[in-house]
Amino acid sequence: MRKLTLGRSDLTVSQYCLGTMTYGSQTDEDDAHRQMDMAWEAGINFLDAAEMYPVNPVTLETAGRTEEIIGRWLASRKPQGAVVATKITGEGSSAVPGGVPISGERMRAAVDASLARLQSDCIDIYQLHWPNRGSYHFRKSWGFDPSGQNRADTVAHMREILTVAQDLVRAGKIRHIALSNESAWGTAMWLRLAEEEGLPRVLTLQNEYSLLCRYFDLDMAELCVNEDIPLLAYTPLAAGLLTGKYAGNVTPDGSRRSRNGDLGGRITGRVFEAVSGYMAIANEYNIDPVHMAINWTTTRPATTLPIIGATTSEQLAHLLKGVDVAITPEIRAAIDQMNRAMPMVF
């Protein structure tokens, strides 16, 4: 497994990051521990979680269960060199009493709660799950309207969070602050405040990115290249669409779609046509479509680390078989042509 240094930090992580959002719901604890063992043996030392996990569904009663499962694995295995990222939940989440927004006070409490569940002294990367001001992610791009945002309030909030992050870093509770579901303007403003006021610099950005979801490719990619911000690409298989298992608009038993019928808004009028196109490319070049979709993300201009997640250890075993599969220039050209023909399908 290829290793790389994250941005301007001293953290060395695997190219693949293991996602854990089904641990405690669709994935029971025994299989979750089996998956983490498998990933570790394959050279993956990077785990991603969130205080609101597991998902499908997200509930107040189950929030934190994923971190608890990871914590018991860390305590029993004591893996040297493991890098753990987790997140504070954004405004409106059913995983937080009252769905309150992110604030400095809540962040201090959330960090302590995550540390206790993870049975750890320090969180390597602490991410803001989504911005208080709102986001065009989660299928909100079609009606995105930033005109109601208050710049002064946003900047004051960012300064508060970075100041608290500085305190948490000094206390040894977190190593780095990071972002998720952010925009180019938002990321640039976080960076500007950090530079001007000597506050912690955001280390990574975690946004959705796949063959079917390529919002990142323009302004965000330019920003991340120039500012050394690696992308942690979540849902690189487009919630399972790029495996082909939903082709023909079917819903396999036990799949994510059996719990979330439209896959978070990803089932649209054009999506299966696009999926068919990518399946055809994989067939033409004799490459597994799962391996093609995941490894394509690692070929992009901006440093990109795919977050791979599996409901079962059998699915993870299949993902791991593709670690060394190469994306040839011919495959990349075919993918580019397909994107021009069927862009922004959800």
Image (cartoon, rainbow, N blue to C red):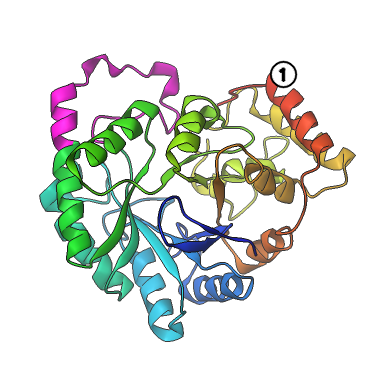
Percent of width and height locating residue 21: 45, 57
In this view, 232 is above or below 121: above
Give the residue number, with chain letter if any, for mark 1.
Answer: 341
- Name the outermost residue toward the top: 147
Q: Quadrant of the C terminus?
A: top right
Q: Choose between 188 and 22: the one closer to the eye.
A: 188
Q: Choose between 104 and 257: the one closer to the eye.
A: 104
- Name the outermost residue toward the left: 105
- Observer able to see residue 91: no
Judged left or right of residue 99, residue 221 is: right
Judged left or right of residue 324, residue 192 is: left
In this view, 121 is above or below 197: below
Callout 1, which amino acid? Ala
For label 1, count other residues whose C-alpha is less than 10 Å away and answer few (under 14), some (14-19) or many (20+): few
Q: Choose between 325 and 22: the one closer to the eye.
A: 325
Judged left or right of residue 31, residue 139 is: left
Disc 1 secondary structure class: helix
Q: Quadrant of the N terminus?
A: bottom right
At horizontal 44% and vertical 31% (from top left) the residue drawn is 223
Magenta highlight on residue 209: no
What stretch of residues is rendered in magenta?
131-157
- Observer able to see residue 212: yes
Magenta highlight on residue 147: yes
Q: Specify the quadrant of the image occupied by residue 78.
A: bottom left
